[in-house]
Amino acid sequence: MGESDSLAEFLAVAVDAAKKAGEIIRKGFHHAKHVEHKGQVDLVTETDKACEALIFDHLKQHLPEHKFIGEETTAACGATELTDHPTWIVDPLDGTTNFVHRFPFVCVSIGLTIGKIPTVGVVYNPILDEMFTGILGKGAFLNGNKINVSSQTELVKSLLATEVGTKRDKETVDATTNRINSLLFKVRSLRMSGSCALNLCGIACGRLDLFYELGFGGPWDVAGGVVIVQEAGGCIFDPSGKDFDITSQRVAASNPHLKDAFIEALRNAE
């Protein structure tokens, strides 16, 4: 079996896991939730934990030689170091606050890194039944149809997405809102969907032109979406303009036409 066949097999296993977890999310979406706080505004539900257990059980059953990093297990057990070994990085329910409020932007995000490089990505929104997939070098797809980033060339006509993050200390909130205030004069409009993974997929399929987020939870927020953006022809980079680091909790994405102007706008917004 060649590498390409192996990656296709890995993707199929991840898609099956995402669908199974998505069924749990769909069933729990309209029901009362038992909500716990990981931080001041960072939530976790029994659905997050059930989905992560299901996904890891499924992946380990089919790919026992691989390593695994998950949001809820990492939150419970401390940081897990990313190595060069094939590693599945999972956010079992990205958009937990949306899930609690029955706002339909929630998803399962599953990414595989090999040599620390995002190689396979699956992001599934079970409420809208949208399955985003990507394999390094093989393109990106939404429900089986090829997707591409937007062709927008002007910042002023671009739709920007970001998130305020989970910190609510005055210094962080002021820096966040000042940055947004600056950028609003340079783009068409702003969206906050509440899901980092779905924002990345919005870039990949051309619904969004620009996205950045600072201080998100960890690599599980981006591991699935990064390869999907890149395979859709998009750019992933650090908001400073430096190379993207999956462990840095900083990400920006755009189409190639807007990258340089976006980086300049972000720098001027600091």
Image: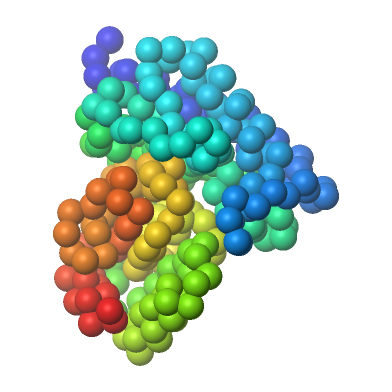
Camera-side residue of 137 and 254? 254
Instruction: Find the residue positioned furthest to the bottom.
Output: 185
Work out whether 1 lies above or below 212: above
Camera-side residue of 108 and 270? 270
Note whether residue 224 is visible. Answer: no
Q: Is residue 25 left or right of residue 56?
A: right
Q: Name the residue: 24% across, 19% down.
A: 3
Camera-side residue of 20 and 67? 67
Q: Name the residue: 43% across, 42% down.
A: 220
Camera-side residue of 55 and 36? 36
Note whether residue 60 is visible. Answer: yes
- Say which quadrant the N terminus sits in: top left
Q: Position of residue 46 (x, y in %)?
A: 71, 39
Q: Position of residue 65 (x, y in %)?
A: 38, 12
Image quadrant assignment for residue 7: top left
- Say which quadrant the C terminus sits in: bottom left
Q: Position of residue 90 (x, y in %)?
A: 47, 36
Q: Is residue 94 left or right of residue 248?
A: right
